[in-house]
Image (cartoon, grey):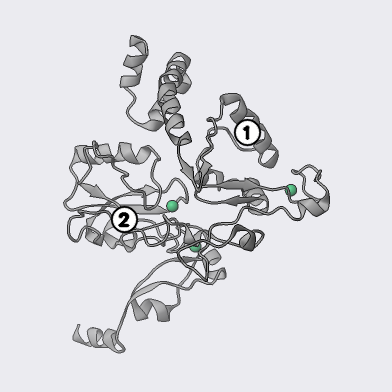
Amino acid sequence: MSGLSEQAFEKLKTLSEIREGANSNSHLKEELIKSIKITQEFLENRTSRLSLHDLKFKIASPAIETEIDSLFESILTAESQLTINDTTLVELRKFHKLKEFIDTHCQIRQYSFQIKKCNNSECTICLPVELPIEVFDELHFLPDPEPSIADSNHYKDFSSIYGTQTSENFRPSKAGQLEADNLPQGIFNNNRVREFVECDFCGKIRCIYSMSALKKEQISTLQLKINDNDFTCGIEEWMPPSHELKGIVFIRQSLSCDSPIESGYYSNRLKKPPICYYCGKNNSLVEATDDLLHGYQSVYPLCSNCQLSGHSFHTWGKKKVGELTRKRKRE
Ligand SMILES: [Zn+2]
Ligand SMILES: [Zn+2]
Ligand SMILES: [Zn+2]
């Protein structure tokens, strides 16, 4: 990089600052692209030498800008209000037409994204199916791996699950991930919640813990890290070893995007707005009955969507019968 670009780059602290910097300084952008090329090629070379069951890994080149633009043009047919800067899943969820398109045409997984024409004559987005219809009907989304019933050490045969409804429940990184090693004892305590960070994938708010209250400078450093938007539920090494808050702040690595909101979020001390315990949304929350509210020390918020899908109020600390009346008498 030229001295001038080095200087400009030096000032950019977070990934989002780098993105913005590159957008407003086309020379810097060009030089950045050039300077990561060698690393990209190196990684490509290393990865292409890997193989699994005698099959070589395939490497796809990163999308170039014209490809991104033309993909974006097609997305506009599904949702005209979208702008190219709406890049996180959380932002995309706010667009109802796009959400409907995704729900009816796509399958989103942590590591894959698939689209298929819907073959619905009323659909205004898909073009008509060109394949012979008997071939089209036999095309399904690629299934998620599921363990074989006969031998749980192996996955089911592709042919036996292709075309069936599968889920991500058996994704290795999802199943029972452990918390990080060397955690300070008792760190995941509601009293140790200091800040919050939003998952870039599911949008749920997760707690950030530290043993003692953070100093002013630490809070601003943490805020910079949060603004990087590089957090996903259960992420390992969110704080890289060189980060000054490494070993000071912690998140729960055992959580996945399907995990409910941590109870620490609801701690009275933090005065956070109520969000659904299961999905983390703050709209259409259902009112809990007085019986529930009086019967438990904590009744966590529930939204009507989650209630419809079969969830009931999550509660904690059942009060003993008569506890209330006795307390009142003592007063
Ligand atoms: Zn369609
Ligand atoms: Zn998540
Ligand atoms: Zn919900």
Given residues 112 and 72, the one toward you in this image is: 112
Name the quadrant of the C terminus. bottom left
Given residues 226 and 128, the one toward you in this image is: 128
Quarter location, residue 261: bottom left
Q: Is residue 57 above or below residue 31?
A: below
Q: Residue at x 43, y 16 (%)?
A: 31
Q: Residue furthest top?
A: 3
Q: Is mark 2 within 8 Å of ligand 2?
A: no
Residue carrying label 1: 72
Q: Is residue 92 above or below residue 211?
A: above
Q: Residue furthest front?
A: 54
Given residues 45 and 140, the one toward you in this image is: 45
Left or right for 166, reference 248: right
Task: Residue type at mark 1: give it.
Answer: Phe
Task: Residue type at mark 2: give it.
Answer: Arg
x and y percent of residue 130 in the render?
81, 43
Residue carrying label 2: 252
CB under 8 Å between discs 1 and 2 = no
Classify mark 1: helix, strand or loop. Answer: helix
Quarter location, residue 84: top right
Along the polypeptide, which appears first: circle 1 or circle 2? 1
- Residue 209 in view, yes or no: yes
